[in-house]
Amino acid sequence: MLFRQLEYFVAVAREKHFARAAEACCVSQPAPSTAIAKPERELEVTLIHRGRNFEGLTPEGERLVMGAKRILAEHDALKAEVAVMQSGITGTLRLGTGPAVSTTAGLPVAAFCAMHPLARVKVRSRLSSGELVRQLRDFELDAAIAHFGPDDRESRELLPLYEEKYVLLVSGEHLVSAQPTITWAEAARLPLALLTPDMSFRQFIDDAFADRGAVAAPQVETDSVASLCAHVATGTWASIVPHTWLTSMPPAPRTRAVRLVEPDADAQISVAIHAATPGSVAARDFLNVVAGLSLDEVFLPELPGTSRSGGTRGTAKAAGAPGAGRTSPRGALMWGSAAREWREALSRRRSHRCRKRRGLPRPYR
């Protein structure tokens, strides 16, 4: 069985249509059908239910398509590994996130691209938690950033990235007065705009409300981060967002964050790659780069009511006050300092790798 036959078979299973599969593979329409017929004769099984149109895979086809995806992924990984030895990582890293986490993906991606300037990154940022797990399992993604539950850890290598906490985002003072904290039970009584229920971040919100015997009944639901912020900016709705947004997406003027308490809910956000070996070279190096980041140190100081040392900041700024809803100068200074430290560390590491390839000794420090 040839690699090309496996590619056609996987394309037909993905597109669920012979003509679209042929277009995706840049061949004429009969090619996928003819190529799939050959392994069917070799294995003496039917892989696809055929009628006037594609009608689905047989049980044997379902089993074979998983093996085909694994073989093609390992084939791509071996080719990439040889290419890395010649010119470093030059391929594309396929990264998946949910909408809530997409705002923080820029930091690890920036660190990865600084290490591998010839690499490219394709980010899919509007995937539900179930779709993230499926695409990672089916080798359609190289890496994913999300919260992964116990049931999502099978056949995956996980690395903790940062701890996510929650704040209420409001505009003006007519919904919530100028106060540093608000309870989940109080937030449940506000007009809310939230992400859709299929997003893992929304599931955490619903669980936190349930812990206090409350139920969120949002008037507006969206799968778009930009749409969520736009609705809050009108002043008509409040929303619950990760505290990381305060750094990666500073709120609009008059919009401020109020810390949610009782309970102090949090979730571990991790990077996951497929545990199969050899695996994607880009994914494994992305994991190595992420291991050197300390994102909790970047995000935690921006949580309302906290400071770098973990103490309280005092009361929140009133809406409309100078600097309200914006990243503080101290936060901006810390952000720039962290970025410089990462660039310097990555530069040292890249220099060391180049010297090692040339057989030169590591310089004394």
Image (cartoon, grey):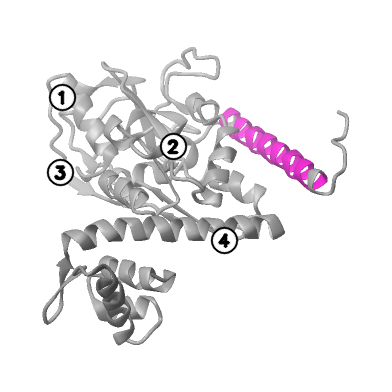
- Amino acid found under the numbered disc labelled 3: Gln
- Amino acid found under the numbered disc labelled 2: Glu
Residue name at image x 26 percent, y 46 percent: 130
On the image, numbered disc 4 is attached to which residue?
79
Name which of mark 2 and mark 1 comes first in the sequence: 2
Q: Label 3 neighbourhood size at 10 Å, few (<14), some (14-19), many (20+)?
A: few
Q: Do the residues labelled 2 and 4 touch (CB within 8 Å)?
A: no
Q: Label 4 neighbourhood size at 10 Å, few (<14), some (14-19), many (20+)?
A: few
Q: Are marks 2 and 1 in contact (CB under 8 Å)?
A: no
- Amino acid found under the numbered disc labelled 1: Ala
On the image, numbered disc 2 is attached to which residue?
157
Disc number lying in front (2 or 3): 2
Q: In this view, does 290 lie to the left or right of 177?
A: right
Secondary structure beneath label 1: helix
What's the CA distance linking mark 4 and mark 3? Answer: 50 Å
Name which of mark 2 and mark 4 comes first in the sequence: 4
Q: What stretch is highlighted in magenta?
A: 330-355
Give the vertical position of 59 relative to 290 (above or below).
below
